[in-house]
Amino acid sequence: MQEEQQILSRVIVEIAGKPKEHIESTMKLVLQKIKESKDIKIEKEETFDAKEKEGIWNIYTELEIKTKDIEGLIGFCFDYMPSSVEIIEPDNLKFDTNSIGHLINDLLARLHTVDVTLKKLKSDKISLESNGTMLLRNIILISVKEKEKDLNEMSALIGIKQEELKPFVDSLVKEGKIIENNTKYSLKK
């Protein structure tokens, strides 16, 4: 069993997104959650003003935290995903093989959870893209059912830019579902 070694670390917690007010309030919620944790003691805290870069707002907080052991620090890292971690004290850490085994198993369990989540998100994304494509195709067909329209009219009706709509319209023309006649489109009867 590993002897308890308190760890003092400097960590940076960052949040990026928009609008500015959202990331600022989210940072406050994250800091509140850290403060409520029984396993983490905040020694120092400094939050820097949100800054905008290329349309995305970024805010960060530098913390000095104390955890009762390395497991606590690693747990903090998994829970809050800091962008930087620097161990200030102690200079050396001692581990026994049992403790290392627990750390590795915890790491693997969390990685497996992330992997399952990513696979589900990928599957959901594929399904949403497929359903979205079918919906858009049906909307295009409905839009030209009663009266022929040009791409500009369809774009205004559907709410999608012409250049984004055109590949779908071209595909329907190629499949023979709609007919193109001098830049106007109609449903094939």
Image: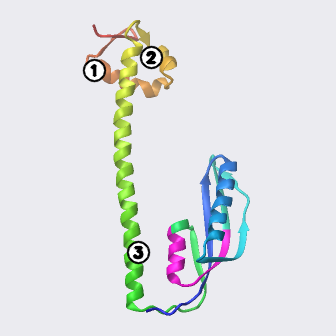
Query: Residue 147, relative to residue 58: is it above or below?
Result: above
Which residue sits at x=42%, y=80%? 103
Along the line of sight, which residue is nearer the eye, 120 or 164?
120
Q: Which of marks 2 and 1 is nearer the N terminus?
A: 2
Which residue sits at x=67%, y=51%? 52
Side of 72 relative to 26 (left or right): left
The residue furthest left is 175
Residue highlighted by disc 2: 151
Residue 173, x across and y down, in percent: 31, 18
Q: Earlier in the sequence, mark 2 or mark 3?
A: 3
Q: Badge 2: few (under 14), some or many (20 or more) residues near its Cα, within 10 Å? A: some
Residue 106 has which mark?
Answer: 3
Along the line of sight, which residue is nearer the eye, 179 or 183?
179
Does residue 77 show up magenta in the picture? yes
Question: Which three-letter amino acid code belongs to the residue tagged 3?
Answer: Asp
Residue 139, x across and y down, in percent: 40, 20
**Magenta segment boundaries in residue numbering:** 62-78
Residue highlighted by disc 1: 174
| Quarter of the image where the N terminus is located | bottom left
Which circle, 1 or 3, is nearer the viewer? 3
Which residue sits at x=42%, y=14%? 143
Which circle, 2 or 3, is nearer the viewer? 3
Question: Which three-letter amino acid code belongs to the residue tagged 1?
Answer: Lys
Q: How many angstroms separate mark 2 from mark 3 (CA)? A: 55 Å
